[in-house]
Amino acid sequence: MPTWLVTGGAGFIGGNFVLEAVAAGVRVVNLDALTYAGNLDTLKSLDGNPNHVFVHGDIGDRALVERLLAEHRPDAVVNFAAESHVDRSIDGPAAFVQTNVVGTLALLEAVRDYWKALDGEAKDAFRFLHVSTDEVYGTLGETGLFTETTPYAPNSPYSASKAASDHLVRAFHHTYGLPVLTTNCSNNYGPYHFPEKLIPLVIAKALAGESLPVYGDGKQVRDWLFVTDHCEAIRTVLAKGRVGETYNVGGNAEKQNIEVVKTICALLDERRPREDGQPRESQIAFVADRPGHDRRYAIDASKLRDELGWTPAYSFERGIAETVDWYLANQPWVLRVLDGSYRLERIGGAA
Ligand code: NAD
């Protein structure tokens, strides 16, 4: 049975990844600092499962990471841990540098030393996979796609800190030989997404009858990928990716933000009409644009498709319908985030 050290596995993508990995027979040691974005409710179904070891701690705590590596002897480390919300990075960039840059560096140093001391097959097979974003490439005009050779041009404190972490990961391969892989993915959506991000925020506010804030003219374009497709891409890169390479991951699903919001409104109107019968589009309210808001992101994921055979399974239409259905069926999960009670778990759940 393989063992993976997964960081940030109580967050949105990491949580989905951990649930799937344990179900697939991987033993997961899950290191998460349980910031506001970490939610142990997501991992409830793993309570008592011996193949999931949750550790409450920081990737920047090198001594802790060294202890975990020595104790659990993982075959791979998958790094999801990050501060991830662009708006929060505008209000307070320091936390982003602390976790995404300083934290990733501490993690890399601990992992490098662990890997150096391995031998034989275990050393050859070991991988460090760093999960990153397409936002490191900056913004696109009306046409064109980000490829793995697009120059980095991050525009927000979030993307700048992720770009710095990507460079450190690259440098640890070139300088120390650490067998790293990096994935740069487009916008994810799906179950367990914290309701500060566009899609879950709009679902929650639409159901609550509140106004649906849309930045600027709403015509910013994002390429959307259903979260389980991202998790599958990460497993594919981990299993078959060429060491030292980066792989772009995308959904071939470019949508304007306003289209996404209108699609959610229509799905909710169909599934749970408002009592007054009014369409939820009437709740849309355009608000002042985010400073430095990137206009368009779009990913060319052909390297991952051609080299490793990965393509997304979900169309946007199927993924967004399943997402809306998941939020309707899992209102207790959402309500515990909205009223803050999910945070009480962190004391009881800490190891
Ligand atoms: P998230 O904010 O939902 O989860 C982040 C998790 O990391 C949380 O559980 C949090 O508690 C944990 N964490 C934060 N600081 C930590 C620290 N110092 N030590 C240990 N744990 C810490 O984020 P997400 O949306 O799941 O994103 C996961 C990763 O994927 C991030 O690295 C992000 O940059 C990247 N990514 C996200 C998207 C997206 O659309 N959400 C797209 C591409 C890449």
Image (spheres, rainbow, N blue to C red):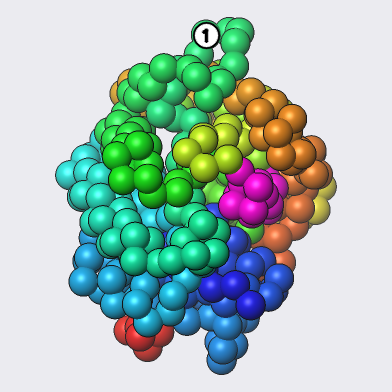
- Does residue 335 sit above or below 70 in this rendering? above
Q: Which residues are magenta?
A: 226-241
Residue furthest to the bottom in view is 48
Q: Which residue is at 71% across, 67% downward?
A: 329
Q: Which residue is at 58% across, 83% downward?
A: 51
Q: For mark 1, give the secondary structure.
A: loop
**Pointer 1: what residue?**
141
Residue 49: which quarter of the image? bottom right
Residue furthest to the front in view is 120
Compared across the picture, whether 134 is left or right of 255 comes to left
Q: Which residue is at 39% across, 49% downward?
A: 178
In this view, the residue in front, 296 or 198, is 296
**Kind of residue at disc 1:** Gly
Label 1 crowd bin: few (<14), some (14–19), many (20+), radius 10 Å = few
Circle count: 1
Does residue 305 belong to the magenta stretch?
A: no
- SS majority, magenta: helix
Residue furthest to the left in view is 94
In this view, the residue in front, 211 or 303, is 303
Would residue 31 be visible to someone looking at this image?
A: yes
In this view, the residue in front, 243 or 236, is 243
- Does residue 114 sit above or below 54 in this rendering? above
- Does residue 6 sit above or below 40 in this rendering? above
Q: Where residue 128 sits in the image (x, y, percent)?
A: 45, 53
Q: Where residue 54 sits in the image (x, y, percent)?
A: 44, 79
Q: Where residue 273 sits in the image (x, y, percent)?
A: 76, 51
